[in-house]
Amino acid sequence: MTFSRMVHFRLLFLFIGSCMFVSQCNGQDKGATTCGKLECPEYKVIHNEKNGFEIRSYKDAVWITTPNITSYTFEYAAQKGFATAYTYFLGNNSQGAKLNMTAPVLVDIQNDHYYTVHLYLPRQYQSNPPSTISNEFHPSKLPPRKFAVVRRFGGVMNNPAIATQLEALKKSLAGTPYEPVAAASADRFTVAVYYSPLDEPEKPLNEIMLWFD
Ligand SMILES: *[C@@H]1O[C@H](CO)[C@@H](O)[C@H](O)[C@H]1NC(C)=O
Ligand SMILES: *[C@@H]1O[C@H](CO)[C@@H](O)[C@H](O)[C@H]1NC(C)=O
Ligand SMILES: *[C@@H]1O[C@H](CO)[C@@H](O)[C@H](O)[C@H]1NC(C)=O
């Protein structure tokens, strides 16, 4: 294991640890949120289709975003992106401010090989984010489009799982007014990880999102 890989694992563990400390990031999941006590971005559910997807409208918010990471695997890109952007939360910012971890970790995936990782900035800092002092991440505004078609799923998040879930989502959209969104988002979509897949992998803690206006 290389040093940088060890750092990634340590950071991932910190993240997992903070989730366990606040007693179940997966806690109280009645459909509204998977964030437990971690702060989450606000959104409204504007349509809920029992069979497999919902339509959300996210409030505009600031996230800490990595550059475009080229990778053959989701795991490598997500760990690398998370590990660098998370240093901002540990004090790698102009004020040395330490920020509480938030959920979820969002990862944009383009053409299977290009990944961008986003961490939600806590509400307290939304209107006045501490400046970044590293060029490995920057503040950005999300969401990219007005609405998201969202499917939840459990288990380990990796490229085969993402491909399977994307197919399942497209299938559930067939014959609905949202069917065109599936075709338009084939090469560019987002996944959300609510906490490490190492814990209770059977719980539904991942999401796949297709954006549209
Ligand atoms: C990421 O980089 C690739 C290769 O340069 C480029 O084709 C792609 O459009 C970039 N994606 C984003 C979201 O910047
Ligand atoms: C801040 O982030 C940059 C880029 O990832 C890194 O080189 C630097 O070591 C980080 N500093 C701290 C204090 O974590
Ligand atoms: C940060 O998290 C801790 C532990 O959950 C909590 O007690 C504290 O109020 C949080 N701070 C802010 C500013 O939300």
Image (spheres, rainbow, N blue to C red):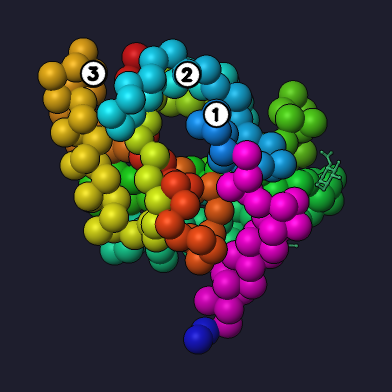
| Residue 169 point in image, percent of width and height | 24, 35
- Image position of 27 with respect to 77: above or below: above
The amino acid type, in three-letter code, at marker 3 is Tyr
Among numbered discs 1 and 2, the one appearing first in the sequence: 1
Asked if the residue under mark 2 is in contact with the one under mark 3, i.e. CB atoms within 8 Å, the reply is no
Q: Quadrant of residue 130?
A: top right
Mark 2 lies within 8 Å of ligand 3 (Cβ measured): no
Q: Quadrant of residue 37?
A: top right
Q: Residue furthest left?
A: 175
Among numbered discs 3 and 2, the one appearing first in the sequence: 2
Q: Name the element at disc 1.
A: loop
- Image position of 27 with respect to 200: above or below: above
Residue nearest the observer in this picture, 135 or 49: 49
Instruction: Please name the residue shown 48% across and 47% down the image.
Output: 205
The amino acid type, in three-letter code, at marker 2 is Val
Is the residue marked by circle 3 packed among few (<14), some (14-19), or many (20+) residues within 10 Å? some
| Residue 11 point in image, percent of width and height | 64, 66
Question: Which of label 3 and label 2 is nearer to you?
Answer: 2
Res 45 label:
2
Res 32 label:
1
Disc 3 target residue:
178
The amino acid type, in three-letter code, at marker 1 is Ala
